[in-house]
Amino acid sequence: MPKTGMEPLRRAALVDAAIIEIGAARSLDVTVAQIARRAGMSSGLAHHYFGGKDQMLLAAMKQILSEFSQKMCAGLHQAKTPRERLEAVVHANFADHVFDRSKTSAWLSFYGLAQSNDQAAYLMRIYQRRLRSNLLFDLKTLTPCADEIAAALGALIDGVYLRAALTGAGPDPKASETVLMTLNALLGDTQ
Amino acid sequence: MPKTGMEPLRRAALVDAAIIEIGAARSLDVTVAQIARRAGMSSGLAHHYFGGKDQMLLAAMKQILSEFSQKMCAGLHQAKTPRERLEAVVHANFADHVFDRSKTSAWLSFYGLAQSNDQAAYLMRIYQRRLRSNLLFDLKTLTPCADEIAAALGALIDGVYLRAALTGAGPDPKASETVLMTLNALLGDTQ
DNA sequence: TTATTGATTGACTGATCAATCAATAAAAAA
DNA sequence: TTTTTTATTGATTGATCAGTCAATCAATAA
C-alpha cells in the first residue's frame, strides 16, 4: 500500500473530511482524530501532512472559498451585459451548493475564528475584496455612486446568506430576489 | 463576609466578567476559571450559581441582547414620524456601544454557537423577530411592499454590522449611511 | 445557645485532545 | 543488494478543563 505520491491524495481527503465533520458537529469543535478517521487514516498521519489542526481547518476554508470563486467565474463568463453580470454575481452567492450544511456551518464558524486567527481573517478579507471588485466593475458603468452601492450590496449579500444559514433550512429561494430588488431600487434612485 | 443575598450580585458579576473575557479571547473559548477569577471568586462558586458553563455564556448573550433592546426602545420613544422611527432603529443598531470589542466578539461567536445550541438559536430568533417587527410597523404606513423591504433591511443591517465587527475597527461612521441610503432607494422605488 | 442555611473555597476527578515519537513497511535510489 | 526516502500506525505524553465534593465560615432563626 505505501506508495509514493500519497501526499496530495491524503491532503485532499483530509480537507474533504474536515468539511464533513464541521458540518456534522455544526462547529469547528472537531477533533483531529475524527477528521482522520473519516478520511480513512490515523491521526498521526493527519498531523504529518498538515503540521497541526489549525492548518487543516484553514485548508478547509480555503477550499470552500476557491470552489466558490471558481463557480462564480463560470457564471460570470456566460453573462454579457453589466446588468447580467451583476445578476450572475448575486445568483452565484445563493446557488444551491453554497447552502450545503457543511458549507454554512463552516462559514458561520469561520466568522468566529476570523476574530482571533490572522490567517482566517485574511481569507475573509480576500473573499470580501473579490465580491466587492466583481460588483464594482459593472456598477461603475451604471451609476456614479458605484462605491456606495457596492458596499451596500456586499453587506446585503452577506446578511441574507447569514440569515439563511442560521435558519438552516437549505437554499433560500427569496435570497436572490431580495438582493435584486434592492439592486434595482439603488440603481433606479441614482440614475 | 458571607452574607445573604449574594446570588444576584455574583450572577451579575459573572455575566459581566464573561463578556469581558469573551472580548479578550475574541472567542467563546474562555474557561470558567478565567471568568470566575475576573469576577473575583472561585470557579466552584461560578458553577454553584450557574450550574454550568453554557448557562453562563447564554446569560451573557441574553444580557447583551436586553441591554441593546432597551436602548433601542429609548431611541424609538423620542421619534415621532414613521420615517424618524425607522431612522432611529437604524441608528440604534449602529450606536457606539454595540461596537465594543466585547460585544462584537460575543456577537460573532454566538453566530457559530447558534448552529449547535438550541437556546442560542432561540435568542437569535428573538432578536431577528424584534428587529423585523420594529421595521415592519412603520414600513407598513409607507409602502405596500413592507414585508420584502423589512426582510432586505434586516439582512442589510446584520450584514453591515458583521462586516464592521469583522474589521474590528470600532464604530463604523458609514454604517447608518449605507442602510439609510438603501432605505431611501427602496421606498422611492415603490411609491 | 444551638441548629440551620447560604456562601465560599480549592483540591480533586475524569475525560478529552493535540501533538509527538518510536517502530514498521514498502518503494525508490544508489 | 544496500541505502535512503516516504508512508503509516497507534500508543503515549502532557496539558487543559468542566464539573464535583467535602469542608469551612458566618449569619440568622429557633
Image (spheres, coloured by chain):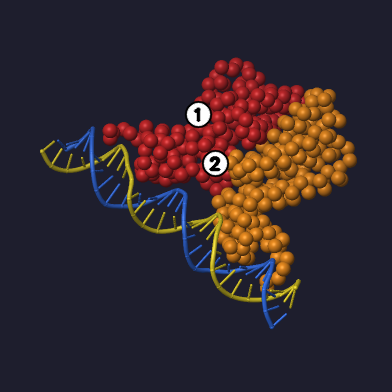
Chain colours: A red, B orange, C blue, D yellow
Q: Which residue is rendered at x = 46% and y = 44% of the image?
A: A31
Dot 2 falls on a residue whose secondary structure is loop
Q: Which residue is rendered at x = 51% and y = 26% of the image?
A: A70
The relative height of residue A135 versus residue D28 in the rendered view (above or below) is: above
Task: Give the number of marks.
Answer: 2
Q: Position of residue D18 (x, y in %)?
A: 55, 54
Dot 1 falls on a residue whose secondary structure is helix
Residue B189 falls in image quadrant: top right
In this view, the residue in front, A79 or C21, is C21
Nearer the viewer's eye, disc 1 or disc 2?
2
Q: Which residue is rendered at x = 38% and y = 35% of the image?
A: A40
Residue A25 appears in the figure: yes
- Horizontally, is B87 left or right of A107 in the view? right
Compute the Cα span from label 1 to label 2: 20 Å
The relative height of residue A109 versus residue A130 in the rendered view (above or below) is: below
Q: Position of residue B2 (x, y in %)?
A: 68, 71
Q: Which mark is residue B129?
A: none
Circle 1 is placed at which residue position? A67
- Quadrant where the image shows the C terminus of chain B: top right
**Is the residue under label 2 in contact with that under label 1 (CB below 8 Å)?**
no
Q: Position of residue A57 (x, y in %)?
A: 48, 41
Pointer 1 indicates a residue of which chain? A
Point out the tag, 1 or 2, that comes first from the N-terminus.
2
Residue A132 appears in the figure: no
Q: The disc labelled 2 sits on which kind of residue? A: Ser
Q: Position of residue B90 (x, y in %)?
A: 77, 40
Circle 2 is placed at which residue position? A27
- Quadrant where the image shows the N terminus of chain B: bottom right
